[in-house]
Image (cartoon, rainbow, N blue to C red):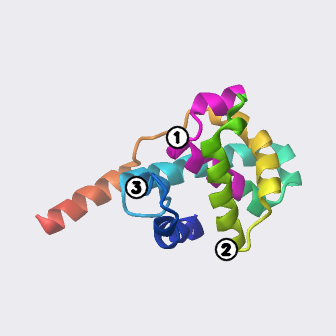
Amino acid sequence: MTWWDKFVKTTFPSLNLMNEGNELYFKQPVAEAFLNFREVTQILDLLLLNVETLQYDASTLAASLIYLVVGKAMGIFSKSDLIKKSRYLQSQDLQRFNEVFELFLKQYNGPELENVLSLTEYVRPFFAVDSCTEFSEAVKENARFEVNIFY
């Protein structure tokens, strides 16, 4: 996720993409990034509860989760697209997104895009489980502490 954040900061501006906002990050100190991070980690927790997951490469699994969460944040596909296995694969926006994601994978020596796309078929049904979007008590308390410092 850190590599994706670096990619968004360094490469996205030169690609002239529409979405360059906070919703594309995972590890930045903004709410959108935290929610993306939480969604990935919660789905990863669910995946690891399924023994079938052990047959897949860990980096490809992580890349497929990042692919789906970022694609959802960019509006390439919706949560219902993921759950219902709809035919979002024909979209022109998706084709551009795949090109960008493949550039990311190559830049950071990640798995092949074909392997990531193949594994998304296994990962997609896990998006049916709603992730918890509430901030934990520790995060809420830390946020109050930071506000007290600056004000």
How many badges with numbers are in the image? 3
Which disc, if any, is residue 104? none
- In the figure, is residue 28 to the left or right of 62? left
Q: Are marks 3 and 2 in contact (CB under 8 Å)?
A: no
Q: Residue at x 72, y 70 (%)?
A: 106
Q: Position of residue 138 (x, y in %)?
A: 38, 55
CA distance for labels 3 and 2: 21 Å
- In the figure, is residue 45 to the left or right of 32? right
120 to 146, vertically: above or below: above
Q: Amino acid at mark 2?
A: Gln
**Residue bearing the label numbered 3:** 21
- In the figure, is residue 139 to the left or right of 44? left
Q: Residue at x 59, y 37 (%)?
A: 77
Element at label 1:
loop
Looking at the rendering, the stretch of residues picked out in magenta corresponds to: 63-84
Q: Amino acid at mark 3?
A: Gly
Q: Amino acid at mark 1?
A: Gly
Q: Earlier in the sequence, mark 3 or mark 2?
A: 3
Q: Is residue 24 magenta?
A: no
94 to 146, vertically: above or below: above
**Residue bearing the label numbered 2:** 107
128 to 7, vertically: above or below: above
